[in-house]
Amino acid sequence: MAPNNNMSQEEEARQKAIDDWLPITSSRNAKWWYSAFHNVTAMVGAGVLSLPYAMSHLGWGPGIAVLIISWVVTLYTLWQMVEMHEMVPGKRFDRYHELGQGAFGDKLGLWIVVPQQVIVEVSTNIIYMVTGGKSFKKAHEVICPSCKEIKTSYWIMIFAAIHFVLSHLPNFNSISVVSLAAAVMSLSYSTIAWVVPLEKGVKPDVDYSYNAKSTTDAMFNFFTALGDVAFAYAGHNVVLEIQATIPSTPEKPSKGPMWKGVVVAYIVVAICYFPVALVGYYIFGNTVEDNILLTLEKPIWIVAAANLFVVVHVIGSYQIFAMPVFDMIETFLVKQLKFTPSFMLRLVTRSLYVAFTMIVAISVPFFGSLMGFFGGFALAPTSYYLPCIMWLCIYKPRRFSLSWFANWFCIVLGVLLMILAPIGGLRSIIMSAKNYEFFS
């Protein structure tokens, strides 16, 4: 009996050593404000810049309604996830898929959550590669209009080079300085995105009608716009992983400081999203581009600064979304395939991941269409209705109670988003691809 006992202690020690090495569980000393700026960095991403464009396809009434409903619904589902993090006494669901396993069972939970979470995080990283490269390019063109034009592909490679270095930071807490800088930048460029147009005033020939050539086009554009809005609320995919970095005791569970951080983050989200969406559409009407900063031309120094702020922000956002992917890959290699935790293992896996997202970004750099497609296809489930289904499975609220109705409303809304938005986004990608030359 004794040797077996020793074996189990050895195995326990090995598991603890692995958990102390993995990115999500290696550091649990974060404060509530870490949660605030990590959530701001995760959520106020490139999505905010496409909101005026989404408004131009939705129109005033539906556009404002979709923005407000999305803000309320996703705040509610985020609260559910924070609550469910420690719903089993003495256990923490540190990763989205672990919560899925708690709700749906070990096997089914993995199959339901992991594919969707991976799609969200990888697609977001690809879109941030595109955004970083295009913002670099715009800043260069504004600062030096007489300089020789550099291909978007090269700018994406320059942006990727930064991540070949940063991706080797071991865990969430080690990227907190990058994340804080990113959160500050998101507030800065969001403010520029609506203050500069407001200063100029409404365009003399502004038009708020749908600029589609046919009713079919208008309908598909409307679907894509729904995906753009869904993409703007993407923080749910990393919320449990962020909460895992906060210390927790039975007397002081992590949900207290985490929720405080989430509320602060959502106030910042409202300050960023609503003025950008409404002012951008009010000033430019249906001529606004899928990234509002590309619509601004003057004053030169502010436009250049705003684009560089975007670059700094998406550097932080890329890392926030990449960290859970690194955790999944490293957990699989170390726990399933029994690799030894080492710096070399990290260097190879993380560098390959950055290279993969860079190559895909260079191949299909369609910012608005990509957001519409992935916003509906992957973000709608993980942000709008998966938390609600888990809540119904775990807490089983009484039928026809307020909680039951609220959850079913979110589920129906999320499923509609998941069906409609990718249709519009995919069609836009196909239309854009007709005139596109690869690696231009």
Image: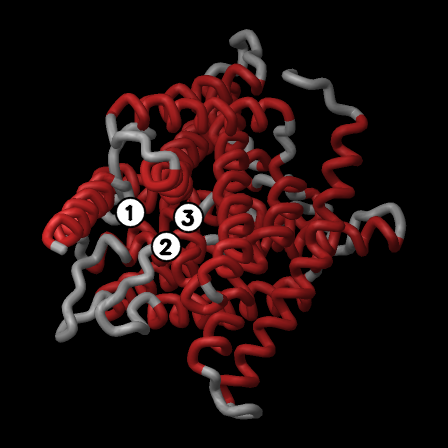
Q: Label 1, on which residue?
A: 24
Instruction: Name which residue lies at 74% across and 49% down.
Output: 424
Query: Counting other residues with Cα less than 10 Å from the Cα at mark 1, is it few (<14), some (14-19), or many (20 or more)?
Result: many
How much space separates mark 2 and mark 1, taking CA atoms? 8 Å
Residue 407, x across and y down, in percent? 54, 78
Label 2: how many Cα within 10 Å (few below 14, some 14–19, many 20+) = many
Given residues 52 and 36, the one toward you in this image is: 36
Tell me if I can see residue 380 in this picture. yes
Position of residue 141 measured from the top left corner of the image (x, y, whole percent): 52, 19
Camera-near label (2 vs 3) is: 2
**Residue 286 to residue 73: above or below:** above
- What label does residue 191 carry, if any? 3
Picture mark count:
3
Vertical order, 416 against 164 (above or below): below
The answer to whether residue 274 of the structure is visible from this angle is: no
Q: Amino acid at mark 3?
A: Thr
